[in-house]
Amino acid sequence: MKICFIGQKGLPLRDDSGGVERHVEELGARLAAHGHEVIVYVRPRYMPADAGVEREYRGMTLVRTPSWNTRATDTLTHVWSSVLDAARRDPDIIHFQGVGPSTLAWLARLVAPRAKIVVTFHSIDRLHQKWGSFARAYLRLGEWTALHSADLTIAVSHGIQEYSRRTYGRDTLRIPNGAIIPTPPGSDFIGQWGLTPGGYILTVARLVRQKGI
């Protein structure tokens, strides 16, 4: 299959990368290793113009598409140009990362009618303290489009799955980020902190209110 990832900032990972970029890198690289053609759209600051428009990375094709790099317009303009580029490549799947980018799922349906549209609902972004009232309203629209315009919506947590059902009456497919390790690899390393397998909780995330830590 040909799979296009749209909405992330870019790859490879940098100091300003987040969980979405890590998600895309690990998922995309594994899909590529299984023989799928994976195209990841990156913003101009991740790939300078003198580096060309495309490059290979971990079996994926990174494609630079333009954006208007301001806080209010960067994501929207980059997603718009990426959807138009993806349409000419005739993909099987267009996978939007996050509710903000999913507001243009309608455009993907219009210009790439053969493609299946998938949205991963990573976070209830409108709760982030950095956004003003207009951005919060736009991200609320993104939640609606993520759950009504996609062929499949993936929730990364039980909380987001329940929020989607309770708020919008829509079911999602829950695929948690992370790994399940059935057998602890050993206690020598964690023992230096006085921990034992199964006797502690580990969270790796920003310490912000919406994480619910």
Image (spheres, helix red, strand yellow):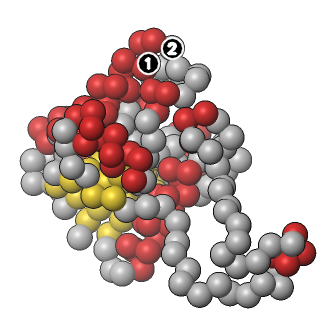
Element under disc 1: helix
The circle drawn on residue 9 is: none
Instruction: Kindly identify the amino acid type of the residue bearing the numbered disc 1.
Output: Ala
Residue 114 at x, y = what percent?
10, 54
The residue drawn where x is 43% and y is 20% is 136
Residue 67 at x, y = what percent?
45, 31
Instruction: Kindly identify the amino acid type of the residue bearing the numbered disc 2.
Output: Gly
- Residue 111 in sight: no
Q: In which quarter of the image is residue 75?
A: top left
Residue most extreme to the front: 199
Residue most extreme to the right: 192
Task: Kindly indicate whether the residue at mark 1 contacts the one at mark 2 (C-beta within 8 angstroms).
Answer: yes
Q: Distance between the residues labelled 2 and 1?
A: 5 Å
Element under disc 2: loop
- Residue 62 in sight: yes
> In the image, 23: left or right of 213?
left
> In the image, 103: left or right of 123?
left
* Position of 137 relative to 108 (above/below): above
> In the image, 31: left or right of 92?
right
* Position of 188 relative to 111 (above/below): below
- Disc 1 marks which residue? 135
The residue drawn where x is 73% and y is 87% is 186
The circle drawn on residue 132 is: 2
Q: Quadrant of residue 139?
A: top left
Q: In which quarter of the image is residue 142?
A: top left
The residue drawn where x is 59% and y is 57% is 12
Q: Quadrant of the C terminus?
A: top right
Count residues near mark 2 (Cα–Cα under 10 Å), then give few for <14, some for 14-19, many for 20+. Answer: few
Count residues near mark 1 (Cα–Cα under 10 Å), then give few for <14, some for 14-19, many for 20+. Answer: some
Residue 58 at x, y = what percent?
52, 71
Disc count in the image? Answer: 2
The residue drawn where x is 66% and y is 75% is 198
